[in-house]
């Protein structure tokens, strides 16, 4: 009889332990899946068809180190013959794909994300719109590599001149 | 002259729709016009624009052409369709090219589609042609895809009112081949055309838009119940007046002003693009918004403008009742919501979940719960480790 009681008690304990473990795992997943937005905001504007992985990793490292929210900003260009507020389905498709990739990568690093699409007649105009609309503590700017997407020296100089706060310019990868 | 006691029944409109000049719309219109004439119908050409294409001109032979009207404008003589002459001639079927054409000042109407409306109202059937970029609602989309904005547009209702739409489809490669062979424009204009509008990526986009447009029209007709129902509806004979807004699909994404809502908007927009549907993004505001919410709302507003979606902010204490009202007003066919938060025992005891309440309140409307895909990648990562 005592053996049966001991066995039941052991089974109950094991079930409780398994339940507690499952609860902790679920809690940790939930925390990792939806990191809370931090008080600091790190803007990460980008242009073009693709996003430089090293630039993204650098921005994520900075955001994680500061407990900041990463704000990836796709800069869309509106052709001059169209109204500035015209819908941009093709660029939106590209932007959403890139922003989703950024979001997925950021979540695995535990960095909260608040994505944006800004528009302008050219990247500089879109940067100006971004500065007008967004709160930020720091801007991380990937510089253009030959043949790659990124910001030109002129655009970078313009941003350094006009943006408040700290600006980190990520230099192009060597040999590319 | 005493007007007839009863106006004649309206003529039928058949539109030949193409993705660009040169696909063969006018040619096909003439082919069908010839076939109708052979079948014994009284066919006349109200206006034909052969664009110096010998094959097209040859196909018009044998069909009576109503002489054009000459209009003096700023020292130039322009030729337009003579509406009064067409109405006097009153054929059974009239072929009128280029539905989106803008008439010279001084004639009855500013636009040719208005002339066509008069011809139809006189009980004459009309065959006409138009390119997809001339449709008003597609003008921005096409301009972005091709970099070229056309000024001559027609309201979508004009096409919607057609009894029949025939898509003249051609692959971009085949059209470029026709262009190179001098079958579309004179040879001295070919290179310029190839460098500007007639690029393969532009044509592929236009073709997609044209195919989608026709598919959408087919969907609309299924709901309206009969071809041309929308035009006849103007005379009080609408067959499906009870479903005025259920034309095609219309999506409604429920959001709150938080960064996580962007996932719902993105997924909803992609679905809307695939369905060729309009997207409404709704926030039901239950109380005054905080500064952070106002900031997020502004970001959502900018996002919806870029996407061509409509942001709606409705005040209401009862979320489900507000969604129900908006869905009814907007003709929603799909509702998308984010994955609800985990419900513990206490929450479950309070009543059914939001998805269950929405399903009960929105009969006949699909409900889609947008999952957080980052959770899946985290699970996979944990499994690997």
Image (cartoon, helix red, strand yellow):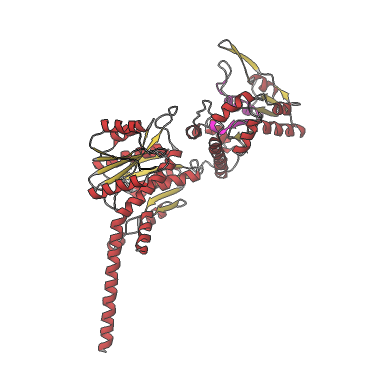
Q: Residue furthest front?
A: A175
Please state if B300 lies on the left or on the right of B143 as rendered.
left
* Residue B115 among magenta residues: yes
Task: Give the answer, above or below, for where B187 lies relative to B384.
Answer: above
Q: Which residues are magenta?
A: B109-133
Give the residue at x 27% y 62%.
B346
* Residue A144 among magenta residues: no
Give the residue at x 50% y 31%.
B136
Q: Estimate the x, y position of residue A129 in percent, counting from the top left.
A: 32, 33
Residue A65 visible? The answer is yes
Q: Estimate the x, y position of residue A152 in percent, counting from the top left.
A: 35, 34
Residue B254 visible? The answer is no
Give the residue at x 71% y 23%.
B65
Q: In the rendered image, which quarter is residue B181 located in? A: top right
Please state if A147 lies on the left or on the right of A60 as rendered.
right
Picture mark count: 0
Q: Estimate the x, y position of residue B104 in percent, counting from the top left.
A: 57, 18
Dividing the image into 4 quarters, which one contains the C terminus of chain B? bottom left
- The front one of B40 and B178 is B178
Please state if B216 lies on the left or on the right of A143 as rendered.
right
Give the residue at x 26% y 80%.
A9
Task: Give the answer, above or below, for where A37 lies relative to B342.
Answer: above
Dividing the image into 4 quarters, which one contains the N terminus of chain B? top right
Q: In the rendered image, which quarter is residue B12 located in? A: top right
Q: Estimate the x, y position of residue B89 in percent, counting from the top left.
A: 70, 22
Please state if B51 lies on the left or on the right of A123 as rendered.
right
């Amino acid at each position: 009889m005592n053996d049966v009681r001991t066995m039941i008690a052991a089974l109950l304990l094991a079930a409780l332990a398994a339940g507690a473990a499952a609860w902790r795992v679920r809690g940790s997943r939930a925390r990792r899946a939806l990191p809370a937005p931090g008080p600091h905001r790190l803007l990460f504007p980008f242009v073009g068809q693709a996003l430089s992985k090293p630039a993204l990793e650098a921005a994520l490292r900075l955001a994680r180190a500061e407990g900041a929210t990463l704000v990836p900003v796709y800069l869309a260009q509106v052709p001059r013959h169209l109204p500035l507020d015209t819908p941009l389905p093709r660029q939106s498709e590209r932007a959403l794909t890139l922003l989703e990739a950024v979001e997925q990568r950021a979540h695995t690093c535990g960095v909260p994300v608040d994505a944006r699409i800004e528009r302008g007649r050219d990247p500089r105009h879109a940067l100006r719109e971004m500065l007008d609309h967004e709160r930020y503590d720091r801007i991380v700017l990937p510089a253009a590599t030959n043949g790659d997407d990124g910001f030109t020296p002129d655009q970078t100089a313009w941003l350094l001149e006009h943006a408040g706060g700290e600006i980190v310019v990520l230099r192009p990868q060597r040999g590319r | 002259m005493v007007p007839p006691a009863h106006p004649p029944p309206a003529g039928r409109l058949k539109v030949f729709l193409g993705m660009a000049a040169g696909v063969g719309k006018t040619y096909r219109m003439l082919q069908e016009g010839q076939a109708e004439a052979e079948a014994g119908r009284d066919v006349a050409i109200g206006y034909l624009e052969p664009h110096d294409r010998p094959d097209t001109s040859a196909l018009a032979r044998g069909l009576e052409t109503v002489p054009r009207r000459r209009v003096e404008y700023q020292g130039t003589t322009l030729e337009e369709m003579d509406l009064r002459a067409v109405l006097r001639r009153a054929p059974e079927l009239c072929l009128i090219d280029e539905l989106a054409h803008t008439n010279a000042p001084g004639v009855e109407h500013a636009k040719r589609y208005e002339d066509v409306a008069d011809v139809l109202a006189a009980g004459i059937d009309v065959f006409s042609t138009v390119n997809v970029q001339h449709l008003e609602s597609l003008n921005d989309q096409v301009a972005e895809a091709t970099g070229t904005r056309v000024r001559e547009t027609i309201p979508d209702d004009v096409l919607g009112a057609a009894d029949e739409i025939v898509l003249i489809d051609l692959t971009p490669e085949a059209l470029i081949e026709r262009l190179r062979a001098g079958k579309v424009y004179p040879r001295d204009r070919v290179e310029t055309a190839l460098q500007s509008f007639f690029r393969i990526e532009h044509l592929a986009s236009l073709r997609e838009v044209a195919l989608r447009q026709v598919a959408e029209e087919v969907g609309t007709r299924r709901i309206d119940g009969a071809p041309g129902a929308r035009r006849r509806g103007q005379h009080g004979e609408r067959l499906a007046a009870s479903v005025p807004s259920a034309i095609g699909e219309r999506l409604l994404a429920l959001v709150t002003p938080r960064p996580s809502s962007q996932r719902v908007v993105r997924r909803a927009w992609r679905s809307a693009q695939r369905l060729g549907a309009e997207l409404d993004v709704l926030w039901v505001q239950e109380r005054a918004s905080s500064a952070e919410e106002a900031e997020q709302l502004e970001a959502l507003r900018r996002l919806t403008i870029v996407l061509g979606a409509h942001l709606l902010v409705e005040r209401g204490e009862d979320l489900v009742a507000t969604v129900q009202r908006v869905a009814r007003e907007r003709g929603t066919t799909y509702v998308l919501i984010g994955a609800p938060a985990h419900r513990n025992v206490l929450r479950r005891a309070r009543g059914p979940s939001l998805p269950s309440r929405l399903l009960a309140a929105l009969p006949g409307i699909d409900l889609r719960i947008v999952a957080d895909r980052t959770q899946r990648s985290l699970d996979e990562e944990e499994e690997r480790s």
